[in-house]
Image: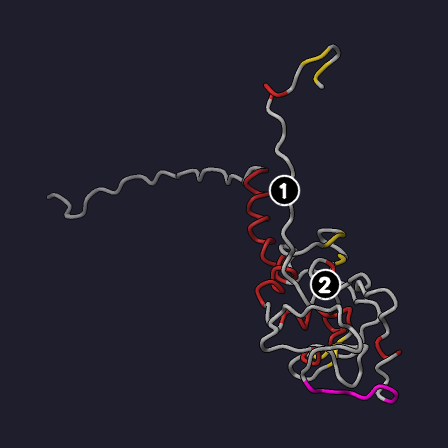
Amino acid sequence: MKSEHPPTRPSVSRKEPPMRLPSGPALAAGLLILLAPAAFANPPAAQPTGTKGPAAQEDIQVPRPPFSEGIFPCTSCHDGKSLKVNPRRRELADMHGDIVLAHGSASRWCLDCHDPVDRDRLRLASGERVEFTASYELCGQCHGDKYRDWRVGVHGKRTGSWNGAKQYLLCVHCHDPHTPRFKPVKPMAPPARPEQIHPRKGGAR
């Protein structure tokens, strides 16, 4: 009588292939992908000298703003006593007549950025006062995309260690805050073509 169950086959043990670790270049590329977002999300920084108040929480190291010679501190004239605050929008005649406002002049005026009470500080749209060393907060209210790029080092200039302390140039180190658009630059003459260079003994002239 034949059995209804098929004969069992002897089990054969299979050897698992050894685990292969990623090579050096592949491992480096993987680490770069994992660490890059964290490196650029919150750039390390240090506190600006002389900044007080809530703006100091930004902790960004900047050089001294490029004040006009003999013009700062502003409270040497704008002390609120001998020179009273005049909030009326007008053309300046007695002082600062050399300033040309070409920065949203249809809707902006001096006291939209300069604090009317404390002229040694700037004022945000919220009414918060910030130091001139934190003027990037004022600029960033309207120019948010530029402020974002400036923070990660894409716009403007910063120096220091890639993974350590950095110093950022302020917006006003490159842009005149009253007339921020760059003036046209006269192009230089193109380089001479090879056939225009006359050979001479000892090399080209």
- Distance (Cα) linking label 1 and label 2: 24 Å
Residue 120: horizontal and vertical position, in percent? 81, 77
Mark whose residue sits in front, 1 or 2: 1
| Residue 57 belongs to magenta span | no
Neighbour class for label 1 at 10 Å: few (<14), some, many (≥20)? few
Residue lying at the far left of the rendered structure: 1
Quarter that holds the C terminus:
top right
Which span of residues is magenta-colored? 81-88
Circle 1: element type: loop
Q: Say which residue label 1 marks.
A: 187
Question: Picture quarter containing residue 203?
Answer: top right
- Which amino acid type is shown beneath numbered disc 1? Pro
Q: Is residue 118 above or below residue 28?
A: below
Question: Picture quarter containing residue 118?
Answer: bottom right
Residue at position x 76%, y 77% from top? 93
Q: Is residue 179 above or below residue 141?
A: above
Residue lying at the far front of the rendered structure: 93
Residue at position x 19%, y 44% from top? 6
Q: Is residue 45 above or below residue 188?
A: below
Residue at position x 69%, y 87% from top? 88
Residue at position x 79%, y 64% from top? 65
Q: Between residues 9 and 79, which one lies in front from this camera angle?
A: 79
Question: Picture quarter containing residue 41?
Answer: bottom right
- Which amino acid type is shown beneath numbered disc 2? Val
Query: What's the coloring here?
Result: secondary structure
Q: Is residue 73 left or right of residue 146?
A: right
Residue 102: horizontal and vertical position, in percent? 63, 68
Q: Is residue 45 left or right of residue 77?
A: left
